[in-house]
Image: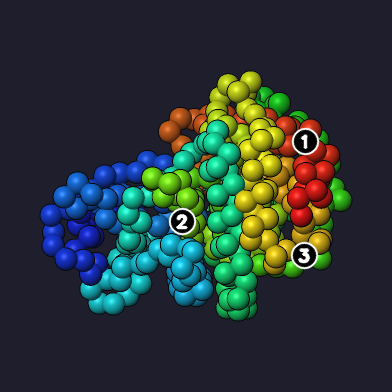
Amino acid sequence: MESNSPGAVLPYFSIAGNDYEIQLISQGYINDTYAILHKGTPAYILQRLNTAVFSNIDTLMQNIHHALPYLNDENYQQISLISTVDNKAYLRINESEYWRLMTMVPKSIAFNTTEDEGIAAEAGRIIGKFHSLLQRAPIKVFKDSIPRFHDLSLRTLQFTEALGNTSSEQLKTAEKAILFARMTLDEFRTYNPGSLPLRICHNDTKLNNILFDKQHKKALCLIDLDTLMKGYFHYDFGDAVRTIVNTVPEDEKDLSKITFSENLFEAFVDGLCENSDFLTKAEVEYLAVGVKLMPFLHGIRALTDYLQGNIYYKVTYETQNLDRCLSLFAFTKKAQEHMDYMQEVIADKF
Ligand code: GN1
Ligand code: MG
């Protein structure tokens, strides 16, 4: 079904005037995102939600609705949703076309990568703040918008199924990645986070989902709340660390450039320690596991999608998922090599 254009849906939201400029933001693998500018200044973010990935938009939006009041704090910049002219939180055109509009935080910036320890520390601090604020929210009202999103056993099952259904040609092209996945799954045999406390997690805490104040580089808030649902803290820790201590993008093709910067790791942990009273001893002991788990999970998901013919992530060329997997696996390896180091730093700082 042909979708409406962003310009055609904008008047359905409660905003004044009509002289807006619309720019496509091509980042992100799931939704279609547009910046809405007013007289040259970014004012709103308009998104068409991906209903193939998010089968229950109502659940997703309810989770955000439940969380927002708890994120209202003088040390946290709250994002607000702009309702539609008929006072709905989002615009539903039909079962596969949903749009939502949000305010843009003025004078803010996001970074895809960083080499700045100040930014790493601020990222840690704001993730801790996000969790301490949401700790007060009643976890029961949050429903899973994507059930078992970071569940390794589900991702393993999907990977195994994809292996059985793919072509021999693809098996050959992805040979190295498949081997690494098998070896690493073996290493995760004893992984069992079941006894850790469930928290309301962001579940996509990559660095570019954190907004910073442009001038002072102070972290303001987390954006992209689509995957806000129950999870374990080491998910959010691992996702942030994988995108901060690696100073190149997660789809870097030159694997020799993939790094694990110890200075950035230590800065991030220092920042987190400013807001980490809520963490239990068992969670602290699991943090380092999150750093090898998250890139591996994303890698195996990308590999699975490559094997099944790129049906989940938006890709711009045929082997993009495989390239992203190789890059994520290369970082997983770095994390594996840094396990003892991370445990020591964490034991020392917490
Ligand atoms: C997807 O589209 P984006 O960038 O918000 C994915 C995340 C990954 C991310 C990048 C619902 O998020 O899990 O971290 O790509 N989101 C979903 O790897 O699958
Ligand atoms: Mg996301």
Mark found first going from the N terminus, 1 or 3 = 3
State the image quarter where residue 138 is shown: bottom right
State the image quarter where residue 280 is shown: bottom right
Q: Which residue is mark 2?
A: 220
Tell me how the rendering is colored. rainbow
Position of 281 with respect to 149 (left or right) is: right
Position of 23 with respect to 251 (left or right) is: left
Tell me if I can see residue 203 in this picture.
no
Residue drawn at the location 13% of the way across and 54% of the way down: 19
The count of marks equals: 3
Q: Secondary structure at mark 2?
A: strand
The type of residue carrying mark 1 is: His
Q: Where is residue 111 drawn, in percent x and y? A: 46, 41
The type of residue carrying mark 3 is: Thr
Residue at mark 2 to residue at mark 1: CA–CA distance: 30 Å
Q: Is residue 151 above or below residue 278?
A: above
Q: Where is residue 198 drawn, in percent x and y? A: 70, 67
Between 234 and 150, the one lying in front of the other is 234
Q: Where is residue 130 drawn, in percent x and y? A: 56, 63
The type of residue carrying mark 2 is: Leu
Residue drawn at the location 47% of the way across and 75% of the way down: 69
Labelled disc at residue 338: 1
Q: Nearer the viewer, mark 2 or mark 1?
A: 2
Residue at mark 1 to residue at mark 3: CA–CA distance: 23 Å
Residue drawn at the location 77% of the way across and 59% of the way down: 283
Q: Is residue 71 above or below residue 273?
A: below
Q: Quadrant of the N terminus?
A: bottom left
Residue drawn at the location 70% of the way across and 67% of the way down: 278
Mark found first going from the N terminus, 2 or 1 = 2
Q: Which residue is mark 3?
A: 280
